[in-house]
Amino acid sequence: MLKIEYVWRELLYRAIEQRMINFKISDLARSFGLSTSVVSHALRPLRDLHIVEIGKNNSHIRDSEKLLFFWATRRNLTKDIIYQTYSPISVFEREAAMPPEVSATAYSACHLYHQLVPADYGEVYFYAQKIEEVQKRFPFVGKKNPNTFILTQDRYFHQYKKITLAQIFVDLWNLPEWYAKDFQEAILVKIKEKIGL
């Protein structure tokens, strides 16, 4: 993930999970060890699209849903894949066999954390810092299309108790499988309930 995406994810986490729309540029900079100019750079397109309003002392999110779609269109999930392989076991067995330190996203996050399974799925996507334990459990098989994907965790991933709803949505947005749309729509309903839409 790009550094500016930390800012977008944090704003969405505050708006969706915490129902807080106010923020300060200096607080965001401090939270992620960024300069205020980098945070301002992340906010500039949001301001131009009237997603956020920037004030001298306080700023606020005007449109959380628009911010969600903005991030989704700029997320490049493929660049974050650090390991992929094929496993012959079922999708639910693969989820259960993952080491405890990884975090599910996409279809598995919808299933495991939110009990949402709007369609059958065959791929699992998980975030991890290290892949050694995953590789032991899921050895590399290169002859078949991969169905097990590991993405790199950014350095601030663990400051959230679990993967954020916005992160799940934007990851789903970027997946090629036809049923990703069904899961996107299901998690979007949950997000809209949280923000009162």
Image (cartoon, grey):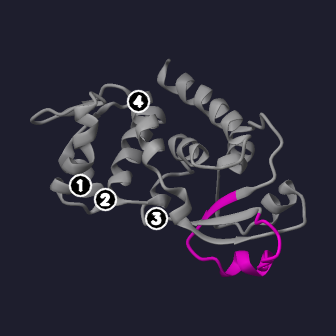
Q: In the image, which is nearer the foreground, mark 4 or mark 3?
A: 4
**Gap between marks 1 and 2, in whole Å?**
6 Å
Other residues around mark 1 within 10 Å, as few (<14) / some (14–19) / many (≥20): some
Q: Position of residue 70 (x, y in %)?
A: 41, 38
In the rendered structure, are the residues bearing label 4 and label 3 in contact, judged by CB atoms less than 8 Å apart?
no
Q: Position of residue 127 (x, y in %)?
A: 60, 62
Q: Which residue is mark 2?
A: 32
Span colored in magenta:
125-146
In the rendered structure, are the residues bearing label 2 and label 3 in contact, judged by CB atoms less than 8 Å apart?
no
Q: Residue furthest right?
A: 89
Which quarter of the figure has residue 62?
top left
Other residues around mark 2 within 10 Å, as few (<14) / some (14–19) / many (≥20): some
Q: Position of residue 19 (x, y in %)?
A: 42, 30
Other residues around mark 3 within 10 Å, as few (<14) / some (14–19) / many (≥20): some
Going by the numbered disc 3, the residue's amino acid type is: Asp
**Gap between marks 2 and 4, in whole Å?**
23 Å
**Gap between marks 2 and 3, in whole Å?**
11 Å
Label disc, if present, on residue 29 of the rendered structure: 1
Residue 135 lies in the magenta stretch:
yes
Which quarter of the figure has residue 43?
top left
Task: Name the N-terminal-most of marks 3 and 1.
Answer: 1
**Gap between marks 4 and 3, in whole Å?**
24 Å
Going by the image, does 92 lie left or right of 51?
Answer: right
Q: In the image, which is nearer the foreground, mark 4 or mark 1?
A: 4
Residue at 78% x, 65% y is 145
Going by the numbered disc 4, the residue's amino acid type is: Lys
Going by the image, does 38 lie left or right of 133?
Answer: left
Q: Nearer the viewer, residue 28 or 40?
A: 40
Q: Which residue is mark 3?
A: 154
Q: Which residue is mark 4?
A: 66
Task: Name the N-terminal-most of marks 4 and 3.
Answer: 4
Label disc, if present, on residue 162 of the rendered structure: none
